[in-house]
Amino acid sequence: MLRAYVGKRGEEAAKKPSVKEVESYTLDEALEIFILAKEAEGVRPRTIEEYRNHIRYLKSFFEEFGYKVNFITDLSAKIIREYILYMKQTKKAYKGIEKREKETAGLAVNTINIRLRTLRTMCNFWFREQLLHANPVANIKQVRDDEKSEVRGLSDETIAKLLNYYDTKEYAQWRDKVLILLLLDTGMRINEAVNLKLSHIDFKLLTIHIPSQTAKNRKGRDIPVTREIAKLLKELHGETSSYFGECEYIFYNAYGEVFNADAFRRRLNRIKKKIGMERLHPHMFRHTFCRNYIMNGGDIFTLQKIVDHADIKTSRKYVQMETKHINKQHNKFSPVKKYLSK
């Protein structure tokens, strides 16, 4: 029996394609095969665009350093590790744009790992589909980084400074201020917020419905909104409709087009310089909501539900306990006081 079993395994091994028998695919051809499969799975267009971008980054590396990677079979663990070193030590985030050029080289560890995960997903797919005879990422690990258990939000002073900057007599500035207040009130992601429709808001129950088509995790959810912010959203929609006719969405630009996340990021980038901030991006308002929610007495499980975290560990990372707050809580709850009072 053992002899026959070994014989069958030998026959199966003989049927496996050798390196020469694997058809050669260029990086672009293999990318299109991968994208076709992902589109069939229902992956969103934005994610598809990111796949293309990551291959573009990889090809730029090949061109810059003269690597001859004509086919995906030319990919190797050695080349990928050199690509990692390039991103860590050489690559600049805004190369070629003088005003945004980084003084120090190297991408953020999180950015590097995102690109690695994408490349790993592709190589695993190509290997399973037998487009590759060997998987070049099989022994490639994620880049390690110093542990960051906390995520900082904006201080109350910074938020006040930012909100006071806006001249609400101007439509665009008022719209931006309302958007910021919405993010601070609900912890919504920026793409969820700019895609908010009037029909998504229940002004009686004071809830906002985020449909699955918009939600990052593809699960629709209802989240609470304060009466004050709901009132501002209604006012903004009314004024926008008076300009452009009845509007479906809440946030529009000055030309009657739906406002988008990239436009908001650019506007924040201009404002941060005027008010003396080093960093200001939409996700910081989400961080601030999560931190303040916990510090004001909210529980982490309800927070997870509101902000749509798939893993409770993600919610914990948003908890930023400042020294001042820790000292205040300690002074309030320290058990030693009952002994001193005797």
Image (spheres, rainbow, N blue to C red):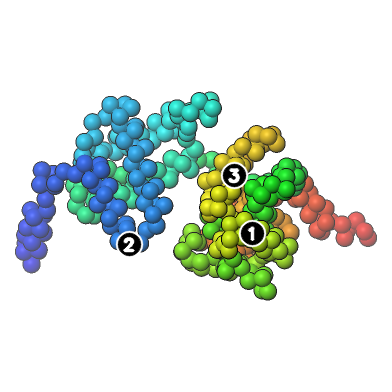
Query: In this view of the protein, which residue sits in the foreground, 74 or 286?
Result: 286
* Left or right placement of residue 68 versus residue 208 in this view: left
Residue flagged by tag 1: what amino acid is it?
Answer: Ser
Q: Are marks 1 and 2 in contact (CB under 8 Å)?
A: no
Residue flagged by tag 3: what amino acid is it?
Answer: His
Q: Quadrant of residue 275?
A: top right
Q: Secondary structure at mark 1?
A: helix
Query: In this view of the protein, which residue sits in the foreground, 338 or 117?
Result: 117
Q: Quadrant of the N terminus?
A: bottom left
Against 340, is 221 above or below?
below
Q: Is residue 124 visible?
A: no
Q: Which residue is mark 2?
A: 41
Q: Which residue is mark 1?
A: 242
Upstream in the sequence, badge 1 or badge 2?
Answer: 2
Q: Which residue is mark 3?
A: 281
- Please state the horizontal and vertical placement of residue 295, each as a whole percent of the image: 72, 56
What's the residue at 30%, 61% (across, down)? 40
Q: Is residue 272 visible?
A: yes
Disc 1 to disc 2, how far (Cα)? 42 Å
